[in-house]
Image (cartoon, rainbow, N blue to C red):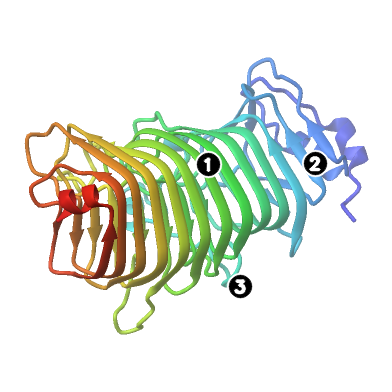
Amino acid sequence: MWKDTTVNMKNAKLYGDGIHDDASAIQALLDSGISCVDLPAPSGHYAIGTTLHLHSGQTLRLAPTTVIRLLPGSSCKMLDNDPNEKESHDIGLIGGIWDMDNLNQSPNPLHPEWAAEYKYPFKPWIGTDPGRYKPDGYLGAAIELQHITRLHIQDVSVRNPVTYSFHCCCLDHFTVENIRFIYDADIPHHINMDGFHLDGGSRFGVIRNLQGAAHDDLLALNADDCINGPLENIEVDGIFAENCKSAVRLLSRGSLVDKISISNVYATSYGFGIGFTNDGYDPSQHKCGKFGRISLQNIFLSCGKPVPDYWGQAGVPVFIFDGCMEIDFLSIENFHRIESFKPLPTFNIAKDVHIGTLAFSNHSMQNTTGQHIPFIENEGIIDRLTAQNVLIRETTPISGKGTIGSFHSDELSRNLLL
């Protein structure tokens, strides 16, 4: 049972003037047991100085244009699900512009060498339970949700988080849709600023219509990052990003990423467009990434212009396969690249990558850089490559010292690729 806060609610006033702290009044509404908390339109905007906690069986709803801003110096997440619930269920978050105001919070704790400039000590975000985020851990994320069955997030905008907009793990049957990322603060370090970051232990979900530009992964599907566990049965539909660092990252250091469908991606990126990665791979541990069946459809990607402090000013290939990994089956259908900025390879496959089947269909590239662009730069192993209706007019479309076991294609694709 939730704590009875009826008496406290009588004395809790919603100011909505952007000056007074509204956190206690909003939390009193959430703690009251109301299944749907509708915050009225404020005269200015809501200001909060502490984290709000959503309970099971509850939806928090704001108008899409209502601003809720973290007060200066609060240095905490803005919203999470009740840390006293071991497993939460049936939670909804609808609407609002959640402004973390990163210039007025403690800096990025993922980089203690930078945080030291501000005399802020590094705090780990994982407690004694390696399967959960630490309730009071400060990662710099605006919204943190974990261990929830049936989660619905809709029509939410996040502005200027310190690191991630959303940090989530262990979600079961979830829908995330119509999310906007607004990163317009002149921060000292453009890094670790993911959009929607989904950690391991998550399955049966839909993520659709993500809009904006992040200074890291707009969408991160990371089976082994902050929380380890499989990611499976997830559909992604609609990513719209102009000059973000990267559109989609899929990461595994051993946990399985399987049955993932990603479609309708329209992005320019100054890092990779879509990456299969095993970041932090330690050869002595022999933990290769494990990817099962992945399907990509309707992908429109090209290179963008790096922000000044980005480490890779030379740019990154559009698709990367980086670190030790096994991929059973990868299908990429309707991929098109119009490149006028960086003559970088479209696909870069690293040495320790092993792909069972790589299937291309309906691909084209228009190259106006004046320089050669390899279609595939392969240093790994591809057991079976198939290509249908691939229009790549480059002198050496496939390069590298890797191996391709068998190649199956229509006549046009074979003539253009070989």
Q: Which mark is residue 237?
A: 1
Say if mark 1 contacts mark 3, CB within 8 Å. Answer: no
In the picture provided, is 64 more to the left or to the right than 106? right
Q: Residue at x 48, y 63 (%)?
A: 293
| Label 1: how many Cα within 10 Å (few below 14, some 14–19, many 20+) | some
Q: Residue at x 42, y 39 (%)?
A: 265
Work out whether residue 165 or residue 360 is closer to the camera in this orientation and state it: 360
Q: Which residue is mark 2?
A: 30
Q: Which mark is residue 129?
A: 3
Indicate the amino acid at tag 3. Answer: Asp
Compute the Cα span from label 2 to label 3: 26 Å
In the picture provided, is 282 more to the left or to the right than 375? right
Work out whether residue 148 or residue 250 is closer to the camera in this orientation and state it: 250
Indicate the amino acid at tag 1. Answer: Asp
Q: Which mark is residue 317?
A: none
Q: Earlier in the sequence, mark 2 or mark 3?
A: 2
Is residue 271 shown to the viewer in this render? no
Q: Give how far across and how far down residue 291 sits, in percent.
A: 44, 67
251 vs 309: above or below: below
Q: Residue at x 34, y 31 (%)?
A: 186
16 vs 169: above or below: above
Compute the Cα span from label 1 to label 3: 33 Å
In the picture provided, is 83 more to the left or to the right than 410? right
Indicate the amino acid at tag 2. Answer: Leu
Compute the Cα span from label 2 to label 1: 32 Å
Q: Secondary structure at mark 1?
A: strand
